[in-house]
Amino acid sequence: MSISALSPIQPSEPEPVVPDTDPTSPADWSPDSWRSRPTLQQPTYPDPDRLAAVVADMRSLPPLVTSWEIEKLKDQLAEAAAGRRFLLQGGDCAERFDECSSEAIANRLKILLQMSLVLAHGGRRRVIRVGRFAGQYAKPRSSDLETRDGTTLPVYRGDNVNAPEFDAAARTPDPDRLLLGHSRSALTLNFIRSLIDGGFADLHHPEYWNLGFVDHSPHAAEYQRMVESIGESLRFMESLAGTRVGDLSRVDFFTSHEALLLESEQALTRTVPRRRGWWNLGTHLPWIGLRTADPGGGHVEYMRGIRNPVAVKVGAGMDPATVVELAEILDPHREPGRLSLIHRFGRDQVEEGLPRLLQAVAATGRRPLWICDPMHGNTRTVVPDAGVLAGTPVKTRSFDDILFELERSFEIHAAVGTHLGGVHFELTGEDVTECTGGARGLSDADLGHAYRSHVDPRLNYEQALELAMRIARRMRDEPASG
């Protein structure tokens, strides 16, 4: 479908009026009602009694987030859907227990702060920062089993389930890992909150965010000029006001993860005083992946009842009518900020698939927050013919493919009359070589220099920063809504 052939959709019904300012969970729902539905991507534990004991223990542990933090994010997501904010969601494909360190956490926070600064400065709108961490310890997989040299074992599903080493003990699902994942999530959140409350995110001191290797980036000079420009503007404003702008000393920061392992999600689903309904207090923004987005499945059943804002991955192979059905199930009252749709198509299918999806949802009068995930549809397997990984099949992603899908998504939204309000990246603050391309022109042969992911390839710090600059330029041409 040609972008030029598209015309803005006129909704078939007016903007919805929310009937209840404080909706509750549905009367026909309970935190365990997902058990009555077919539920995919759940590990098979050899000791069900131990699993039950672990889940019971988790129910007694303190929550990781609060309902008022969740409501604050929901309000900001509603503003993003209206064009007044922009969502930046990013982090590891799957967190590792052995990477829960102060340096690794700080580096992830640094690159997201740098990207958000670029987006806010270039896009002229406030940025919502959502980390894909503090709970992203599980991953859906395309197969339950993996075979190497004639030996077949359960596939690695993330540290919350099993370990990546290829032996029977490591690959056996272990429910005690759920407790380890909860503790690592709590440690991560505690450190992030301490950094932010201590002034780490203070716009007066963006030098706190500098990564040790950022000076080597081809975009270092451009980024430094931006930081200096912001500093000069801030000092000028404070000089006129005669006081320090204190609101710029800290930022809001939220967490998200794929709500995949429903045993642990249910364990952290609680009621709270003076608020109605059930809340997932393990994260601010849980999402449903493409593999588990069956309207009749257990994941959708679970998510329809919690009061958090929720997101769903949608993309190639999904009927637009199914996306509309998902929206009706997950957001029946059309609450502002409740539903985000994260589209992921890949460069070869975005021009054909995205317009149909946008038109189908827009025709219902719905206005969800649309987010582009240009990562997952652009994964490919290569066998480098040189370097440390020569002859070894590895997953990678091309920077050019990611950028292509991003830019086409902006254009398609504009042509249809909808609004792209956010981006979703798998990235790291480390100097890895897992995605090809970018300003340095990494090739397949370069992947072996620092390929560390056990699941999906991530953007490194300079590729992520370059994408933020490209998005900011695009946003500059699209005035924010009033």
Image (cartoon, helix red, strand yellow):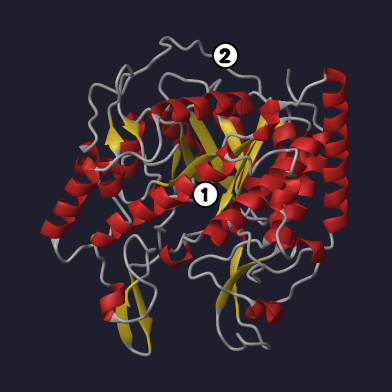
The residues tagged by marks 2 and 1 sit, at their Cα atoms, a distance apart of: 31 Å
Q: Residue lying farthest front?
A: 242
Residue 418 seen in the current view? no
Numbered label attached to residue 156: none
Give the vertical position of 210 relative to 342 (above or below): below
| Image quadrant assignment for residue 8 | top right
Mark 2 vs 1, N-terminal side: 2
Residue 247 screen position, x and y as percent: 67, 27
Residue 155 in sight: yes
Q: Which residue is mark 2?
A: 15
Asked if marks 2 and 1 touch (Cβ < 8 Å), the reply is no
Please tell me which residue is depicted at 79% across the width and 48% down the height of the picture: 469
* Quarter assignment of residue 168: bottom left
Quick one: quadrant of the C terminus? top right
Check the image and report above or below for 38 versus 168. above
Frontmost of labels 2 and 1 is 1
Q: Name the kind of residue labelled 2 in the image.
A: Glu
Answer with left or right where residue 125 lies relative to residue 430.
right
- Where in the figure is residue 241, as x and y percent of width and height? 82, 18
Residue at mark 1: 132
Residue 114 at x, y percent in the picture: 71, 48
